[in-house]
Image: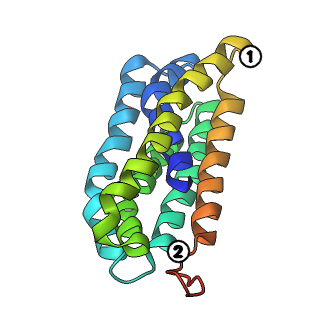
Amino acid sequence: ISFGFGLIGVGVMLFGLIPFLTDEGFSRSTAALMVTAMSIPAVVAKPIWGWVIDFVQPKLAAAAGFATSAIAIVVILLGAKVGSVPGVTIGALLMGLGYGGTIPIQEVIWATYFGRRHLGAVRGVAMPFALILGAGGPLVVQFYFDRVGNYDGAFLAIAASWALGAALILTARKPARRGQAPRDG
């Protein structure tokens, strides 16, 4: 569920950032550059997050990534409202950094909590939920835009979904084997 809430924001930002920024008065080329500014750190951050989870609990790394993304969307929203290209750029870079580790961290958490032997079954149960949320996010945001005429509330809701994802992952406990009490990971 936690990673599902995180995935909502990734799709929304990849599909909605350009329309949002052009509606806020930025040129299409600047808006497209911001998607690139998000994507490059997302790629570069993957090995960094992989290194981080060797030293901290994976759920702490996941929560940090989700929280970074939540903060990033607020920075993007505020930067856009004042017409600040540097502000939006900082938000986009933070966004990429935040969601860049999602996949490697997710895999480590699933393997740590459920074992590698059951990873396929866990993915089979969890991924449809996450993908439905991720695919539905842009549709809901566009529906919101069609009704309200701006992206502000929808983007704040996406930031809240990332914050909720961070809170949920922090409360996640390893499942107990039969006859054992649950342990935290």
**Mark 2 near mark 1, Cβ–Cβ under 8 Å?**
no
Q: Please identify the residue farthest to the bottom as the structure is shown.
A: 180
Q: In this rendering, does residue 24 appear at all? A: no
x, y percentage for residue 5? 56, 47
Seen at 38% across and 64% down, the residue is 105
Which image quadrant is residue 144 in?
A: top right
Residue named by callout 2: 175
x, y percentage for residue 161? 63, 47
Query: How many other residues sit within 10 Å of disc 1, few (<14), some (14-19) or many (≥20)?
Result: few
Amino acid type, callout 2: Pro
Amino acid type, callout 1: Val
| Helix, strand or loop at mark 2 | loop
CA–CA distance between discs 2 and 1?
42 Å
Reply above or below: 166 against 176. above
Which image quadrant is residue 116 in?
A: bottom left
Which mark identifies residue 119? Answer: none
x, y percentage for residue 156? 68, 39
> In this rendering, would 68 be left or right of 153?
left
Q: In this rendering, does residue 172 appear at all? A: yes
Which image quadrant is residue 112 in?
A: bottom left
**Residue depth check, mark 2 versus mark 1: number of the one nearer the observer:** 2
Seen at 36% across and 75% down, the residue is 53
Q: Please identify the residue farthest to the front as the structure is shown.
A: 179
Seen at 42% across and 26% down, the residue is 31
Which mark identifies residue 148? Answer: 1
Seen at 29% across and 59% down, the residue is 46
Reply above or below: 79 against 41. above
> In this rendering, would 101 be left or right of 10?
left
Front one among 84 and 54: 54
| Helix, strand or loop at mark 1 | helix
Front one among 3 and 99: 3
Front one among 164 and 100: 164
